[in-house]
Structure formats: C-alpha cells, structure tokens
Image: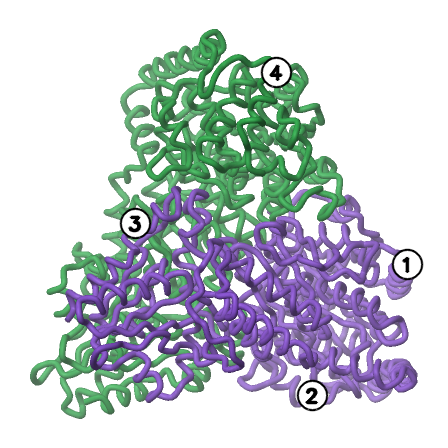
Chain colours: A green, B purple
Amino acid sequence: MAHAIRFLAVDAILAAGEGHQGVPLGMAEIATVLYSRHLKFDPADPTWPDRDRVVLSNGHGSTLLYSLLHLTGYHHISLDAVKSFRELGSTCAGHPEYEPAAGIETTTGPLGQGIANALGMAIAEAHLNARFGDDLIDHRTWAFVGDGCLQEGVGQEVIQLAGHLKLGKLTFFWDDNAITDDGSTELSISENVAERFRVAGWHVVEIDGHDIEAVDAAIRAAKADPRPSMIACKTTIARGIPRLEGQRGGHSGKLFPDDRAAMAERFGWTGGSFDIPADIGADWRATGKPGAETRAAWRKRLAAAGNAVQDEFQRTISGILSEGAREAIHAYKAKAAAEEKADFSIATSGDIAAALYEALPDIMTACADLEAPTNHKRQLSAFTAKDRAGRYIHCGVREHAMGSLANGMAAHGGIIPLAVTYLPFSDYERPALRMAALMGLPVKFVFSHDSIGIGKNGPTHQPVEIIASLRAMPNMTVLRPCDAIEAAEAWEIALEHRTGPVALIFARQSLPALRRDGGAENRSARGAYVLQEAEGGPRRVTLISTGSEVQIAVEARVLLQAQGIPTAVVSMPCWSLFEAQDAAYRKAVLGEGTVRVAVEAAVKFGWERWIGEDGGFVGMTGFGASGPADALYRHFGITAEAVSEAARVRL
Amino acid sequence: MAHAIRFLAVDAILAAGEGHQGVPLGMAEIATVLYSRHLKFDPADPTWPDRDRVVLSNGHGSTLLYSLLHLTGYHHISLDAVKSFRELGSTCAGHPEYEPAAGIETTTGPLGQGIANALGMAIAEAHLNARFGDDLIDHRTWAFVGDGCLQEGVGQEVIQLAGHLKLGKLTFFWDDNAITDDGSTELSISENVAERFRVAGWHVVEIDGHDIEAVDAAIRAAKADPRPSMIACKTTIARGIPRLEGQRGGHSGKLFPDDRAAMAERFGWTGGSFDIPADIGADWRATGKPGAETRAAWRKRLAAAGNAVQDEFQRTISGILSEGAREAIHAYKAKAAAEEKADFSIATSGDIAAALYEALPDIMTACADLEAPTNHKRQLSAFTAKDRAGRYIHCGVREHAMGSLANGMAAHGGIIPLAVTYLPFSDYERPALRMAALMGLPVKFVFSHDSIGIGKNGPTHQPVEIIASLRAMPNMTVLRPCDAIEAAEAWEIALEHRTGPVALIFARQSLPALRRDGGAENRSARGAYVLQEAEGGPRRVTLISTGSEVQIAVEARVLLQAQGIPTAVVSMPCWSLFEAQDAAYRKAVLGEGTVRVAVEAAVKFGWERWIGEDGGFVGMTGFGASGPADALYRHFGITAEAVSEAARVRL
C-alpha cells in the first residue's frame, strides 16, 4: 500500500516534469498507517464536520496528499487529476490549494504555515467539543512536518503554544530525513529537535518512519497521551530511488524513467504508469469504511440531539450569522448615533466586539499579548489547557502564530476568528494574512495603533506604509473607519464577508463623531460616500480621506467653504469596495472635474487612483517620529490648513 | 550606581508622562555590573570599531539605555536629552533609534529584532576577527532580552542559529520577571526557557538578577565559555516602586510623583529630580576609563599594523567600496553586452555577485536554505562554527532571522550584507526589511522567483502584490531589472547606495538581452528611461514596464509600429529613483500626451502614478495559479497582443 503512494507520486512527477519526491517516498509508510488504521475520515463526505483533519505542512510534497486522496477514493482527486499534476486547472496543483470538497484542508507551501493552521484546527476542535460535546465534535488533527516547518520562527511559536495549551489531539509526524534544500541539516541546525519539543511540554516518540508497526505503536501512544504528540520519524528521503535516496537531490532533483524502473525493481512493483494493482487499490479503498460507519453513527447522534441543537450546530458549522448578530451591530450604531459617541477608536471596536460576543458564540479572539491596549477581551474568558470553553486566546508575543492559527480555525469551520494586534506588528503575521487572502478565509484581522497618532512610542510603532501594503493584497478587504458609526458599519461588512479576510484598522486615539445617522443603511458598504456635500454652488473641491484624518478633511472643508469654495468631503473607508461600484457612482463621489485632495496619515502610494496624477495629497512622505501626536501631525504638515491650501493652489 | 539608573529612568518617564519603567528598574543591577566591570567601551569615541556592542532588545525599556549612556558620559545623551525623553526631536525617543554617534547601536521596539541584530553583530565580529586578527577586532556583543523577544518566532530562530554557529562572544541577559503586557507569563508559556537554550547548544547560567556578585560571576562564566551564553536573570519588574513591583502594571503603568517618593524612601535616595549625587556620578563616569585605555592601545596596534592593513581596515569599516568593485561590474556589463547575454535572471545576479565577491571582500551573503535555486553562493565557503573566514551563511529555513541578522551586520559595520531568498518569502522577513529602511542600513536584499513566471509551484510561490508592498515602503529602493545589463546597473546602484536598503528583484526564468550598450553610463540610475523610442513620427504610445515584462512591451511595440503607431518602450527598473528626477525628464520619458500602457506581471496597485487614471494596465488582478509559466502568461492575458490592444483602444 505504501508503494502505491510512491509510484503514484513518481508517475505524477514524471508526467509533470518536475515536483518534490522526497516527502511522498519518505513518508509513505507513515501515511499508510495513519490512513489505514487510525484516521477518521469518509471520502464520501470530505467536509463531514467531525472528520479528523490532515495537514501536509511540508506542502511541496503534495503528491503524497494527492496519492492518499486518490487511493482512498476522494472523487475530486480522480486519476485524471493526478495525471494532470501541476498543469493549469488541475486540482492537483504544485502545492496543495485549499479545497475542502477535495479533501485538501488548507493551502501549504510557505513553510510553517501548515502546522500553525493545524494548531488552529486543534483549538477549534477543543472549543467546539466543549460547546457541543463529544457526540458531535471529537476528532484529531494530524500534520506532516518537515525540517523547514520547524526552523521557521512561526513553527517554533506553534511548538511553544501547542505545548502550553496541552492540545492532546494534535499530532505531528516529523519527517526526520536530515536533508533540506541546501543539503545536510547539519549546515543549519545542531539542536536535538525531539528534546526541543519535550522542553515545550510535548509527548515525543522517536521511531523508524519506515517501520509500519513502530508507526502504529507511536500513533497509539499519541492518542493515549494528554499532551500534543510529536512522532519523530527517522526516514530516508526519496526512499526507493537508488540514485537519490538519502541525498540532497532526493528533495526535488529531476526524475527520469530509469529512476522509476530502479524503484520498481527494488520493490518488485509490477504496475505500469499510473496503474495500481487491483488488490492494492481495493485495500486502499477499504480504508474509508470504518469512517463511513463512524459517520453514520455520528449522523444518528446529531439527529437524536434535537432540533435546537441541530439547528445551532448546522448554523455554526456553516458559518451563518446568528439572528442577533446584525441586530447587535444596528443597536450599537443607533446608540452611538444618539450619544454622538466619541471614544478611542480601538475601544469603539472593542465595544462592538463585546456586543457581538453575546450575540455570536462562534467568535473566538486571538491576541498577541496586547489585551489591555487593544481592548477586545471584554467578557470573554481565556481558552486554556483547563478551560476549553474560553474564547480568548492569549497567544503571547507571537503574532505570526496568531494569524496562522486564526486561519486554521477558519479552515476548520465552526469558528469566526478574530486576530488582534497593533497595525505596525501586522508585518510579523503578513505571511498569514497572505494565506488567508489566497485561501479566501473569513478571518477578521483587527488592528489598532494605525498611524503617527500613537505618538511618543515612535516610528517603529507608527505604520505609514502598511495600510498601502494591505490594500495591495488581492482579496484582502481593508477597512479604516472614521468614527463609531463607520466602525459599526465596518464590523457589519466584516461579518457578512465570507469569501476572504478583512483587515479592520483602528486608531489608538479618540475620534469625534462625524456621522449622526444611526439607521440600518450601511453607507460604508459602497467603500466611499459623500459625507458632507458642497454648499453654496456646484462642488469645486473634493476632499477624500479615511479613518482618523476624515476629521481633518471636515475641518479643511470649513476653511474652504468660508472662502466661498464649495467643498465636499468623501469618506473612503474601503478602497476595494469602492472600486467594485459602478463607474457612475464612483465619478459622482469623486467629483469628476473638481479639484481632488486626499488626506491620510500614511504614504501617498496608490492614492493617484483616486486623486489623479495632479491631485493633492496631504500625508506622510517617510517614517514617523517620537513625540506627542498633535506635535507630529503639525510636524508632518497633516493639518486642515495644509489640506485647504493643497486644494486652493489647484483651483 | 544601579539606583542612579532607576531614578534617571523614573524621572524621565515622569517628565514624559509615559514610558516603560519595568525594564530599567528590573535590570539596573545587571546593567551596572556589565558597564562597570566588563563592557569594553569608550564614551569619547562611540563608534570605535572594536567596542563591545550593546543591544537593548526589549527596546520599550529605552530609559535603561539612555540612563547608561548619560551616566557613562556619551555626549549626545546629555541631561537635557534625557529630560526631553519622548519629545519631538529628542535623541531619547520613545524607543531607541539607531544613532551610533550617540551610542545607540540599533533601533529596537518590535520584539525579537534586537537579538537578531545582535546575532548579526556577533557574526560580523567573528568574521572580521578572522580577517583582521585579534589585534584589531576582538569584542563581544551583549543583549538585554525580554520574554517577548523569546516568544517571537524570530527570537527562536536566533536561538537555534546562534547555538549552531557557536558564537561564544554573544551574551544575552534575559529579564526573567515572569510578566508580559497581558500579565503573568503563565498565560502564554509553560516551557523552561533556560532548558530551551541549552537544547540549542547555549551556555546557560541562572542567577538572581539583583545580586551584583552573581551577575558578575555569570558574566565571567559567559566570557570563559566557547558557546553563546544566556544569563537567566530572575528579576522583579519595576523593582523599587512598591505599588507596581512584580505586578502587571510594572511594565508601563502610569507613574506618579508618589511612586518616586516611595522608591526614594525604599532606597534612601536623596537626589532630587534628574539629580545624581556627585560621588555616584563620578563612579559612573569612571566606568569608561578602562575602555579609553584599551582604545589607546588598540590605536597603537592599528598604527603599527602598517599602511596597507590600516588602509584596508579603514576602507572596510567605513563601508567604502574597494577599487575593483565598480570595475568588476563594468567588466561584467561590457561582457554581457558583447555576448548579448540571455540567462536565468537570478543566475545573472549570481554571476555579478560572484565577480563582486572577488573584488569586495566585505560582502557576506546570508541565504535561507535556497542555495541552489538562488545561485548566490558561488565561490564562497560557508561561515561555520569552525570556519569564521567563510562568507556564506546557511541560515536554514529562517528568513526572518536572515533579514534581521543582515541588519545587524550592517549596523556593526565592516560587512556589506546580502540576504537572499525567493520574493514570495520576503513577507517572512518583512519586519526586518522595515527596520532596515527605518534605520537606513545599506543591506542588499536579493530576491528571485518574482512572479507567475515561476510556473508550476503555484500561487503560494508567485508574488503578485509584493513588489507593490515593497515600493510602498519609505527608503526602500526597489530594483527590478529586465536583462543582464540592467541587472549589472541595479547592482551598481545597490552598492553605491549607502543610506538605506535595496531590494534587488530577479525572475527565475531566462530573460533575453534587450540592452546592447555595455558602457559605463548607468541608465537605470534615473529609475526609468526610454529603451526604444517611437519611430515613423511623433510618439503616440508609451509602453512602460519592468523586469521580465519589458520583453513583452518590446514585442507589443513591434505590433503597434507595424500598424503605423509610433510607440516607445520605457523600462522602469526603479520607481523611487525615477520619482526623484526632475519633472521635465519624467514628462519626456513618460510621454506626456501619449497613450500610456504599463505591463507588469503583478497587481496594478500604484501604477496610476505613471499611467494616469485612464492609462492601460496589463497585469494581474488577483493571485496566480499552478501551471507552466507560458500557459499562465496567456491565461492571465499578459501578452504582447493584450498590451497592443490596451494601447489601441485608447488612441
């Protein structure tokens, strides 16, 4: 059975002309034992909520996963799909790409992301288990892991955090083949990896990864231990190909038909290209049978749980908002309008989150050691080794793991994850942001401290380019609200957006109430709108702004109107939503033919899209500085007077 | 003496109205022992090349550093500077900002960066020691480290790598106060940190961080051990302030005059605000005396070393290019022009680097486990625990540490660091890129695999938004050359650019020779230039492009010229250099009044700056896909025909 993996993988790589044989040839026995004796899965229903999750963190070894999915009978991974490995349009892409219906639980390739996703999946499982009980949620998370995943910092963050949280249903199979792309791992690491896991509180078993019974015993031990388990599997990279096994070239060195022939001779394999002997194929297809029975029993338990439980379970797993979620936001908005609420921008977000925490039990909030200043814990208790019902994850100072585990929770389903930190530290989790955008995962990335407005902590803590860098990312919806009403609208957009991540960007400082309309209409949903129309004649100037600078635009409008210049203020909380509007709306909002000036406490990069080549821009031209916020705004010339002047000189 | 640190720090924080007292109050004894008994430094010459380096990795505790620099007599850190802590323009910024003349060796604040810089400094020292001998280079690197630095993934990468490289002159002081911003470290970590270091091959001493003699003994032990040392210092956060010590609020909770009074009573301190008793002040100023003597002896040794050694040492330390560096590039360029060299873009960069390696011994190259595919090792031997003369650092799969240690090498001086990986993985080191830009460090970040041109490895490995996100970063010079000649020019620009980092972006695929002029003129230095002028009449169309897509623009020009449409091609390897040109040049190149179309295999974000609101753009609108490169270019419509059509419809 293990050889069936090997030959499918090699045939796919030979057909594609490239690929990474090291992993499938090295981990074939491990995978075979997992799938044939332990994994809870049913190829007939790849998205069964209580299935075990499998993550191929060493994603370059994608043919291992495709072979397994094909052999066990996942319909999307047909033999034709495997044959088209790496061709445009194939489900069998170069690296696994998130497609739950095909059995691909997450996108992997950038190293370390997969195990961090697995951590998030294990957290999701533990929490949903606490919420819905063993009858409905009780499954394990397994990850195939290479040396690279464990060298990446995010991998180390995962080791620390998973050990700390004692996620006993999380198991890693470490492909200890002593080879990375550069050659021997001795080039770059000296530590005893197994010991490193033990220090972090993991259960570790060290085995020969080609010994079927050893793998089986190790998995049994893992299942019996309350700690997360790392099964350190001594393997031979590219096992079976005499020219490459145990060598640096085993990783992804080009394969030739002779290599396949040599491997066939070694293993006595008689099957031709893409040809699995019938008996072995039958054995593989039989591996799904126990899972099918388990799933049938699970369905009975769900049916027996009663309508209320069924409905709530299905709603949760499907990611459908609870009845009360929108109402909570609308109620907050009405209240904020009535109170003309002015507050620290990030605190308003916390207020909205707190209202949602009540209405939407699906939310879990992860934060990287900034509980107090980001203000999003509120009534949540902590998710800990002892309390799985907690919904707030103290991630420690580990932004990267935070972002990636949030992705894992979203990929698992049943959780609406928030990941909260300062905007300047978003760079630490940027690989996770990118993966969320690429996979289309509905993660809410919440950021505070979004500009020089943070003041005296200085330029390391003052984003100037980061808003632009997030706007540049495809499928990342970036929202930067200007007051409490827009904050509520941003949250409503974020909750309803299911096809990708959202970056909710808030200031640390207090923002005045600029909007007074607390009704159900979500004006931010069009990305930009006229906040204040020009008065006293046809509009001559359009001031465009976002977030904390909208108030400056409003002040500048007063100056311009006082000089008899009809001026409108456009609030533009979300560029991509505005881009998606029809041209007529965009032109009307932007005021075609008027002088356009944008103001944002960030770099100009990208703003020409809205102000044209000759439009005015008031903002930052470089990094910030350490000093009081008001002094910084004056120092960098981000003032109503400067905005007014930038408009006047263009009239 | 330790209390002098405490009171200066508290007085500065009280004056500023905010700050982080936890570190200076908790680490005062440690710092006092280091500076008074062990540190090799001379406040009269803060940039003395053979000084010990001190990094405050827990940079929020900046008043610890300012107090030390003031007390020991660094002129830039006057009492007035300390009094203006956190005010606009003060050298005593909220977090330490790189200013070697003031004794501030690196910018810190974003956690983990400092210790990674320290790792780079220790590598630089070890290599320069091998190159110039003990007489000229023989110093140590010390870092103050908080829990956050060790939770961040980059910190863990540093621990692994420093242990592996056995950097015996690197010492960390871990401020083991069991408190982070969220409260007890028990919220987020369970592992034994000391054991974690031991597993990685570090020498660890565990002491009471307030015990002067214990600190002294630990430092002695560290100096005697061939491994890097971690001194685990049990400390009390905010020690001395009864209301806050050992508490969560000790980190940065607001201080009041009563707190100072209570601390003064506790320690019997009689000095008023910013008033250091004369005898204690004298003791502090005396700490620099041994260093002054050591420096005098060092100067004698340098003088005795002979003119050739002196000149080379001074050239190296000053970062001045060797005589042969430019010549090597010009020779390469002439040869490439003569051969009409077409090759894999990243391999041409490797060729140029190889020529520079000969001519410029100051270069060290760090790479994150992509030696073969990035092709920049060439004749360099590895820098290892046994061979410090090696100039190639196998960083393992640790991009973040790679980038940050490159920053540390640059900050140390005497090294021109290259950091090499795939462009899609630049996100992993983005915090390091930002710090390099903020500090203005001349690090050369070399990237290959810059677009869908990488083909079958798929969208995880295909940057589409990353070029834009780098261009958005202030002070980051981004160069994307179109052929071997431009590659040489990009390298020349990179070498001569001393005030900030450079991102050199190369394709994996082969690029044809588009330029034939191999002379000394560096046309890329203006950022953009007319590669091919329009023919047959006044220019009607301007095609603008970068990197691997310039060849598509050239093909499109053929199509348009064939239709009688005079068309120019502009190659724009560097936006920021072009932005810096005078308006007349920019207008002439961009062809004011002509139809402008840009082509780049990346998102449009930012391109409106050059093509205007109504210009054409041919590129990516989302993430890439897995498939052969040529199929992807066709699939995403990045073709000469599409470019030609985008121009035609606008005529």
Question: CB of mark 2 within 8 Å of CB of mark 3?
Answer: no
Q: Which amino acid does label 3 sit on?
A: Arg
Question: CB of mark 4 within 8 Å of CB of mark 2?
Answer: no
Q: Crowding near pointer 1: few (<14 within 10 Å), some, many (20+)? A: some
Both marks 1 and 2 on one chain: yes
Q: Crowding near pointer 2: few (<14 within 10 Å), some, many (20+)? A: many
Q: Which of marks 1 and 4 is in front?
A: 4
Both marks 2 and 3 on one chain: yes
A564 or B649, which lies in front? B649
x and y, in percent, of residue A637 in the image: 39, 86
Left or right, residue B308 beside residue A80:
right
x and y, in percent, of residue A505 in the image: 38, 61
Both marks 4 and 2 on one chain: no
**Which residue is situated farthest in the top direction here?**
A279
| Chain ID of residue with mark 3 | B
Instruction: Tell me the SS state at disc 1.
Output: helix
Which residue in the structure is indicated by mark 1? B221
**At 63% from the left edge and 29% from the top edge, which residue is drawn?**
A229
Which residue in the structure is indicated by mark 4? A267
Which residue in the structure is indicated by mark 3? B634
Both marks 1 and 4 on one chain: no
Q: Which amino acid does label 4 sit on?
A: Phe
| Residue A189 vertical placement versus B557 (above, below) | above
Q: Which amino acid does label 1 sit on?
A: Ala
| Chain ID of residue with mark 1 | B
| Residue A330 vertical placement versus A635 (above, below) | above
A163 or A372, which lies in front? A163
Among the two numbered marks 3 and 1 on one chain, the one whose residue lies closer to the N terminus: 1
Q: What residue type is labelled 2?
A: His
Left or right, residue B52 beside residue A643:
right
Left or right, residue B438 beside residue A353:
right
Q: Which numbered circle lies on residue B76?
A: 2
